[in-house]
Amino acid sequence: MIVKLISFFGSRTCSYGAAIADFSSFIMSIVNSFKYLKKVRFRTYYEVIINQTIFTGVNALIIVASIALLAGGTVIIQALTSLPKFGVEGFLGNLLVIIIARELGPLLTALIVISRSGSAIATEISVQKWSKEILSMELIGIDTRLFIVLPRVIASVISICGLIIIFDIVAFLGGYLISQTVVYISLDQFGQTLINAFTFKDIGAAFLKGTLFGITIPVICCYYGLKPVSKFEIPIYVSKAVMRTLFVTIILNIMVSIMFYV
């Protein structure tokens, strides 16, 4: 029994180690491709960046705003009805900033982007590899690592940072309006509590999370998108891309929160 357990955990450890080494090699290949960046005109990536930004950012506005409205309304209603019971209503702004601006805004935005754009990136690249489009680009001398990954990273960083700002604005203002149907608080008082609670540290942490998420999501999804060797493996690697990206995103969110607030 002990031998079987050692064998099981040993094989798992070796497989995880090999996967980490392979992913590290993929990252290094992207970094090494940067030396050719000066030879490439930005116009080459312009259309891809614009299309990815529209899909990841603009087309996701409605769902991000809807979720922000519901989340903001729920949090604000709970805060306004619960805090006075404990005599700590003066901490309303701090609580809202902690829950919405620091955690819910960046994390929920990232989860939405992963479910929409992350899965789409992995699927698109998998199909391109299966149909030999990526091989064709390599044969004519195009650096596919640079051409595929870089524009998506730029678009994701821009989109996620922008969506986080929109999420917070809608969550605070829209949530405030929804909360007025249950509990009344003047707009001046509500706005002043938020202004007093916000710090540059909160803004910096949110943008750092947005930047890290914007880099991590397309890189991991591109990595798994390049893995399938047959069309039957496409859904397997797309599922892996989404699950791995979710896991890494949550870990990054925790790490940044610890770095800024602990």
Image (cartoon, helix red, strand yellow):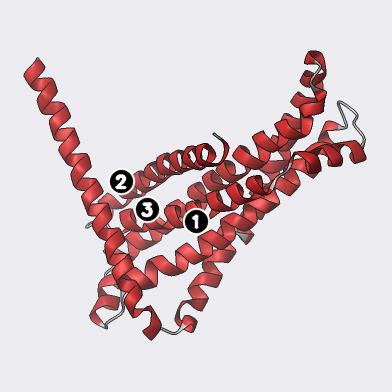
Task: Please indicate, yes or no, whether residue 204 appears anywhere in the rendered image.
Answer: yes
**The C terminus sits in image quarter:** top right
At label 3, which amino acid type do we have? Ile
> Disc 2 on helix, strand or loop?
helix
Residue identified by numbered label 1: 214
Residue at position x 41%, y 43% in the image: 248
> Where residue 250 sits: x, y (%)?
47, 39
Give the answer, above or below, for where 201 lies relative to 185.
Answer: below
Residue at position x 51%, y 77% in the image: 46
Closer-to-camera residue (154/241): 154
Give the answer, above or below, for where 120 lies relative to 47.
Answer: above
At label 1, which amino acid type do we have? Gly
Task: Please indicate, yes or no, whether residue 174 appears anywhere in the rendered image.
Answer: no
Whether residues under marks 3 and 1 lie with C-beta atoms below 8 angstroms apart, the answer is: no
Whether residues under marks 3 and 2 lie with C-beta atoms below 8 angstroms apart, the answer is: no
> Where residue 158 sits: x, y (%)?
57, 62
**What is the CA distance from the residue labelled 3 to the residue labelled 2?**
14 Å
Give the answer, above or below, for where 207 lies relative to 108.
Answer: below
As drawn, is 96 to the left or to the right of 89? Answer: left
Residue at position x 56%, y 65% in the image: 53
Q: Residues within 10 Å of mark 2 (few under 14, many from 20)?
A: few
Residue at position x 59%, y 45% in the image: 106
> Disc 3 on helix, strand or loop?
helix
**The N terminus sits in image quarter:** top left
Residue identified by numbered label 2: 236
> Where residue 110 sits: x, y (%)?
53, 47
**What is the CA distance from the residue labelled 3 to the residue labelled 1?**
11 Å
As drawn, is 28 to the left or to the right of 84? Answer: left
> Where residue 73 sits: x, y (%)?
76, 34
Residue identified by numbered label 3: 220
Which picture quadrant has residue 188? top right
